[in-house]
Amino acid sequence: MLTTSQRFATPAPRTRMIDADAAQAVFQNAAELFAALACPTRLHIVCELRHGDQTVGGLVRSVKCSQSNVSGHLRLLRRMGIVRRERNGNAVVYHLTSAVADLVCDAVCSRRGEMQKEIVNFPGAFDSSDQPAAAG
């Protein structure tokens, strides 16, 4: 049986310390990725590219948005390093290049049914009216 002093003793220090600067860089990169994927249209585009390379026209048909809208989203995804484009004759083909974005989209796409059930079971859970008021 442990004594009180043993139960509340300071735990032994871990042998491997986490570099706070490295952790901060990882968290910053993750936050930027999540921000880029926070838009439903961009998330849809990335999920479509998981199934293979596509042209802007193919993505327009899949995502059901205008060409200029899809092009704008692709421009941001390209800037973030999530997708890459290549010219193939007259066509420009887009590829998914971020393994982390692929994993995030895999989690979302493979659990779409579960997520839909959660949203139905918790009406208003994603309602913007629950957001705190901006400080002013």
Image (tube, grey):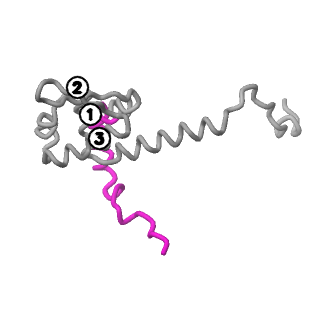
Q: Is residue 12 left or right of residue 29?
A: right
Q: Nearer the viewer, residue 66 or 1?
A: 66
Label 3–label 1 contact, CB within 8 A: yes
Tell me if mark 3 has few (under 14), some (14-19) or many (20+) residues whose alpha carbon lies within 10 angstroms of its own. many
Mark 2 surroundings within 10 Å by alpha-carbon count, few (fewer than 14), some (14 through 19), many (20 or more): few
Say which residue label 1 marks: 47
Is 119 a magenta residue? yes
Residue 79, image x and y in percent?
35, 40
Q: Decide whether residue 103 is among the magenta residues.
A: no
Residue 43: mark in rendering: 3
Q: Amino acid at mark 3?
A: Leu
> Which one is nearer the viewer's eye here, 53 or 122?
53
Q: Which mark is residue 51?
A: 2
- Under circle 3, the secondary element is helix
Q: Which residues are magenta?
A: 108-136
Q: Measure the alpha-carbon separation of dots 2 and 3.
A: 13 Å
Q: Are marks 1 and 2 in contact (CB under 8 Å)?
A: yes
Name the image quarter holding the N terminus. Answer: top right
Secondary structure under tag 1 reads helix
